[in-house]
Image (cartoon, rainbow, N blue to C red):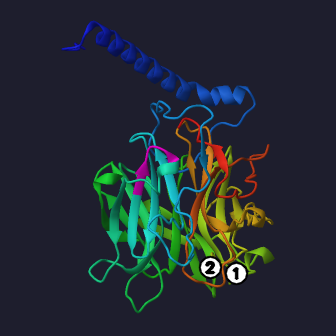
Amino acid sequence: MKQAGLSGKDKRYALKRGTQRAAALFLAVLTVLTLPAFLSGCGAKAPLKITEDRTVYALRTPLRNSGDTMKVLISDPPGEDPYVVTSGAAPDPFICFDNTTDYYYGLSTQNSVLVLHRAKLLEDLFLGEEYETVYVASAEAEVVGSIWAPEMYFLDGRWYIYTSGQLTYEDGTKHMFVLESETADPFDGFHFKAFLDNSVFGIDPTVYADRNSDRRYICFSQVVNGGQALCLAELTTPWEMRNLTLISDPARYEWERTSDGPLNEGPFFVTSGERLFIIYSANGCYSDTYCLGVLEYKGGNPLKIDNWEKHPEPVFRLNKSENVFAPGHASFFYSPDHTELWIAYHCYYSHNYGAKRRMRVCHVQKVEFDENGYPAFGKPLGGETLIPVPSGE
């Protein structure tokens, strides 16, 4: 391409930069094509899978240097009064990285307001200046009251946000609804699409696409017999579900019902090798005993409770020595080069006395799996801990 108006030096620089970019693109495509085989050949695990319908044709040119670090805390810290919730808070955090737009996206709620954040760097996500209000619950809107635990997925050429709200101010029960993006760019706005099922008292919806059967499923927490259990249904379209079934007994283990239980909520699908897990939260989110448990798919029809196994011990729980209380309601996301899986979760920095609205902060850290592909998440790290930035960032 002709470089009009450039000096000889500038032309050489432009040619050099063009060559570098072409080489970087070639290496990125070559990495995508060869990395799974290379990892398999050297005995390491191939990149993990979570619901993501967009194909990664080219990876970003890293914006950070090797050895760069960031803090575990990526939202506002609690101030002197922990009951004051700031605009930088991020309860029930959802994060994903989209290679097509080259942004991290994060969802947070401020009572009745649903906010979408984006940033090039993970550490800037909830504290940066790029954010849009995508929905406000009000008497003039489809739902009222507070909005809980939104998640966002790219399906059939559009982004869909799954969350829950109230139908009336008098009815305190939550009902799940779906927002649809205007275009393939989530920052172009959303509109209300549909309720999933107004007869269901459900919260914390999450989505999984099964590549073997081309079917999609939605899992959420439903109030059942005075407790909260995990339910699964098939998504016939991104906004319609059928064949609702219970897949977890929230009173299976004593550690799931030590605070305001039995209670299972905040599910998220994670695949490791050939194993499919639902990582979920147990107990009240305001309690010190809030933690992450594991439900594993064992084969057969996923819409049958007998085909899911609940593991007997939590895999992520409080870390008093670093003042991390009630870690839970996790989402998982890829690093920009898709070689690492990361967790985003909320927590408190001190013991919470009862079910009171107070500041919850967002932590992120890389997660690992053992030699059998089972979650080995370790402990939640203190907010000021420095960790390597995500691979490929």
Image coordinates for residue 44, horizontal then vertical, percent: 73, 33
Q: Are marks 1 and 2 in contact (CB under 8 Å)?
A: yes
Image coordinates for residue 74, horizontal then vertical, percent: 54, 55
Along the line of sight, the residue nearer the viewer: 155 or 83: 83
The mark that comes first in sequence, 1 or 2, is: 2
Image coordinates for residue 53, horizontal then vertical, percent: 46, 46
* Residue at the top extreme, as displayed: 8
* Residue at the front extreme, as displayed: 80
Instruction: Specify whether residue 274 is in view.
Output: yes
Tell me which residue sits at (35%, 79%) in the image.
Answer: 143
| For residue 355, above or below residue 7 | below
Q: Say left or right for 152 vs 384.
A: left
| For residue 318, above or below residue 64 | below
| For residue 216, above or below residue 60 | below
Tell me the residue that label 1 is attached to. 262
Q: Say left or right for 146 vs 351.
A: left
Q: Which residues are magenta?
A: 117-122
The numbered disc on residue 228 is 2
Q: Is residue 118 magenta?
A: yes
Residue 353 lies in what quarter of the image? Answer: bottom right
Q: Label 1 to label 2, Cα distance in Å?
A: 7 Å
| Amino acid at circle 1 | Pro
Instruction: Specify whether residue 238 is in view.
Output: no
Q: Is residue 38 magenta?
A: no
| Amino acid at circle 2 | Gln
| Badge 1 element | loop
Along the line of sight, the residue nearer the viewer: 5 or 327: 5
Along the line of sight, the residue nearer the viewer: 119 or 268: 119
